[in-house]
Image (cartoon, rainbow, N blue to C red):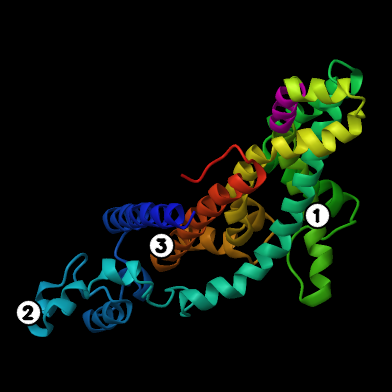
């Protein structure tokens, strides 16, 4: 197993490097002069030069041959690209704070929303999928499938706006938008959590229903029924375990969102999380924050993919880490 983990880590390195390379290249080609945006259009050449030095923009993009001539081989990597690659990000242009401080100040807020959404949504999806699959062809199956497709068809933005109008502006049950401190943050978090669960439960229920139906029709399930095992025990001890691989796969896709936040949700509900920070940074062309968050999210995703492959062997003995 350790050799497999080592190989996967080696495969992860070029993937992360490719993400950083593509992101850095696109920002270098498409974005305007960051120093000019930060200093303003009427900034003097002296101010512009000071801002460029502060942001590290006065150094070469890829390789610093001048520094290599003065300092040797170590100076060759004293460039903007290697700063990004080695997590040496300059301070944010908008907030004038280190990117690491910004991320760790926003991440708990995103987790306060996304973690309950993830747990509630996954639990409801699995319960509903097992229930409707055990009642295939009956009215609970038809009703749940109809509601799931309806939820998938309605745009998330419409659900968010409708919930804000109904529960916030009309009934005044929850605040429309904003965030509180400490316990007061709960009243602001309830509505975003509810609408996120409502908007995302349909797709997962449909997917897991299909997976469960495939397992229900297998030979080992029919054998268990013929031995007198109850339908509830078959679903919870046999079928549920064998559908854990697609569950783990979907979980890996969702977990980076726990840290990175939901972009539209946090922007619309004015939640000061990582997702809102990323949207604001894109609008303000704060490429330091955007590149840093892209880099972090790619590393998180690759690490979770590695963890998922290892968990496959734990939940399914048929999987081998050869």
Residue 239 picture location, percent across and down: 77, 33
Residue 69's label in the rendered image is 2
Mark 2 vs 3, N-terminal side: 2
Label 3 crowd bin: few (<14), some (14–19), many (20+), radius 10 Å: many
Residue 141 visible to an observer of this rendering:
yes
Q: Give how far apart the Cα atoms at labels 1 and 3 are.
A: 31 Å
Does residue 211 belong to the magenta stretch? yes
- Residue displayed at 52% across by 61% down: 278
Mark 2, Cα crowd under 10 Å, few <14 / some 14-19 / many 20+, is: few
Asked if 321 appears above or below 217 in the picture, the reply is below
Horizontal side, residue 260 vs residue 20: left or right: right
Q: Give the image location of residue 187, x and y in percent.
A: 84, 64
Query: In this picture, which residue range is highlighted in magenta?
Result: 206-216
Real-space CA distance between mark 2 and mark 3, rounded to the nearest whole angstrom = 29 Å
Say which residue appears at 26% left-offset and 73% top-offset: 57
Q: Looking at the picture, does residue 103 appear above or below residue 242?
A: below
Q: How crowded is mark 1: few (under 14 residues within 10 Å), some or many (20 or more)?
A: many
The local secondary structure at tag 3 comes to helix
Residue 114 percent location from the top left of the image: 69, 57
Q: Which of 9 and 159 is in front in this view?
A: 9
Q: Mark 1 points at which residue?
A: 191
């Amino acid at each position: 197993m350790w050799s497999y983990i080592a190989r996967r880590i080696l495969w992860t390195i070029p993937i992360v490097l490719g993400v950083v390379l593509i992101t850095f290249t696109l920002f270098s080609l498409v974005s305007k002069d960051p120093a000019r945006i930060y200093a303003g259009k009427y900034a003097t050449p002296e101010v512009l030069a000071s801002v460029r030095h502060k942001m590290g923009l006065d150094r070469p993009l890829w390789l610093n041959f001048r520094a290599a001539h003065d300092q040797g081989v170590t100076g060759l990597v004293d460039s903007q690209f290697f700063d990004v690659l080695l997590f040496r990000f300059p301070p944010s242009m908008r907030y004038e704070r280190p990117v690491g401080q910004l991320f760790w100040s926003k991440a708990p807020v995103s987790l306060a929303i996304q973690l309950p959404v993830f747990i509630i949504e996954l639990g409801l999806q699995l319960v509903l999928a097992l229930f409707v699959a055990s009642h295939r062809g009956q009215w609970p199956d038809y009703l749940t499938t109809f509601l799931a497709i309806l939820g998938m068809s309605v745009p998330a933005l419409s659900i968010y706006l409708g919930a804000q109008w109904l529960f916030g502006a009309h009934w005044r049950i929850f605040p429309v938008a904003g965030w509180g401190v400490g316990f007061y943050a709960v009243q602001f978090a309830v509505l975003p959590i509810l609408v996120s669960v409502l908007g995302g439960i349909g797709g997962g229920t449909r997917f897991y229903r299909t997976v469960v139906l495939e397992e229900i029709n297998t030979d080992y399930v029919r054998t268990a029924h013929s031995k007198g095992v109850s339908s509830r025990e078959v679903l919870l001890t046999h079928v549920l375990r064998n559908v854990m691989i697609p569950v783990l796969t979907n979980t890996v896709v969702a977990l980076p969102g726990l840290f990175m936040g939901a972009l539209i949700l946090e922007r619309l509900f004015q939640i000061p999380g990582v997702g809102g920070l990323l949207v604001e940074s894109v609008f303000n062309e704060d490429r330091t924050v955007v590149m840093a968050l892209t880099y972090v999210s790619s590393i998180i995703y690759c690490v979770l993919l590695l963890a998922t492959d290892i968990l496959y062997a734990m939940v399914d003995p048929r999987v081998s880490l050869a």
